[in-house]
Image: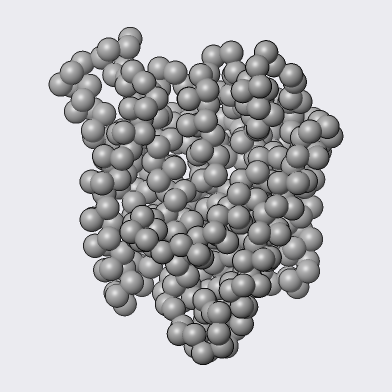
Amino acid sequence: MSVTASDHVATDIATPDAAIKSRIASIDIMRGLVILLMAVDHVRERFFYHLNVSDPMDLDATSPALFFTRMTAHLCAPTFVFLTGMSAWLYARPVRGGVRSPSGFLFKRGLFLVFIEVTVINFSWFGNVDTIFLQVIWAIGISMIALSVLVKLPYWAIALIGFVIVFGHNLLSPIEFEPGESGYTLWAILHDRGVIYDGAVRIKASYPVLPWIGVILLGYCAGPLFARTMNMINRRKMLVGLGLGCWMLLVMLRGFNIYGEVLPWQMQESFLLTFMDFVNFTKYPPSLNFVLLTIGTALLMLAWFETLSNKFMNVLEVFGSAPMFIYIVHLYVLLISYRIVLATLGPNNGDLFALSSVWQIWAATGLLVWVLYYPTRAFSRFKHSSNMAWVKYF
């Protein structure tokens, strides 16, 4: 789901003569964590659909357990897109050799992701092609294509465009187009969700791409933090500083309802509900506050992961080293599993089979992760030892 070619490299150094690593463990670990959180959310969507959640979530209809389960998945898309930009910067600067342009690889991989989204991935959700949903893989693909063009600009210009998009796109929220109006289709793709084609096969833009283009540009500009000349201690200080800076800005903007979110928060009948309202952010399109919370958290976790080394981190690193493989496989495992369960046990909630408690979502995800760990590890080893070009796209 991001650039993960064998040239995704940097020196993780505390001393000048530290050994060069073929991959950056903390980035793979971070990617692996959000893959697991993504799996939790997809289990929820498959086996807990009778209590589906809105965006932002309806506090009157969503229990705290379901609210925070859904909220953990907020970290996924921003982190994937941000790390994609960061990995593009690293791809352009391999350990051995000079600087190279990532434009060609970004453009081809972006097109590949769009193709995968509308074919393999779209079918995995419902087992049919009645409607094509343009979701997160589509958004990443379009963002990569945009970056493949914008990467030719000076570094400062890329950073400026990224900041303007991420910090300014909420100003565009009042702009709306009705279906059939000139500009509706383009605006649905860029900033608002909507059906952009209503024929024999409907096409719905579910992930407005403009904010994600801003996120990938900022991720690209964050790439120097993992340059082989960057000392690990200094990198961790900068990651922590940037992460806390995102959080502090979020608290100020959200605390006073200044800017960055469509719906203001209000005092509720309890502290827990008030906190839930405070962090109840819009994801489609991702508001500034949504991005500040998630990217700030990701930066802090990247700094933390550089200090950890244990078996769980090793598991996360495996999942993060082959993200596209596990993304596709886990969706089809969930589709097939749900149909088997529905056929054998029958529906227990209307026409659906549904788990009865939120904790069962997490338990089912644990089982899913355990089943997929060894196939993912095997594919990761094959991918990173293979010289076949097509393998690198997974």
Task: Say which quarter of the image contains residue 93.
Answer: bottom right
In the rendered structure, the answer to whether residue 26 lies left or right of residue 375 reads right
In the rendered structure, the answer to whether residue 28 lies left or right of residue 267 reads left
Please determine whether, in this image, residue 285 is positioned above or below residue 18.
above
Which color scheme is applied?
one colour
Relative image position of residue 17 (x, y in whole percent): 51, 90
Q: Residue at x 40, y 46 (%)?
A: 36
In the rendered structure, the answer to whether residue 299 lies left or right of residue 244 reads left
Q: Across the whole image, how many numbered discs are drawn on residues?
A: 0
Looking at the image, can residue 84 be seen? yes
Q: Residue at x 68, y 65 (%)?
A: 238
Relative image position of residue 234 (x, y in whole percent): 66, 72
Please determine whether, in this image, residue 39 is positioned above or below residue 32.
above
Relative image position of residue 391 (x, y in whole percent): 33, 66
Quarter of the picture holding the C terminus = bottom left
Front-lying residue, 193 or 78: 78
Task: Say which quarter of the image contains residue 222.
Answer: bottom right
Please determine whether, in this image, residue 22 is positioned above or below residue 286.
below
Front-lying residue, 175 or 39: 39
Q: Which residue is drawn at 47% across and 48% down?
A: 34
| Outermost residue, left side | 344
Looking at the image, can residue 170 be seen? no
Q: Residue at x 23, y 56 (%)?
A: 374
Relative image position of residue 181 (x, y in whole percent): 71, 29
Front-lying residue, 117 or 316: 316
Front-lying residue, 37 or 237: 237
| Outermost residue, top side | 350
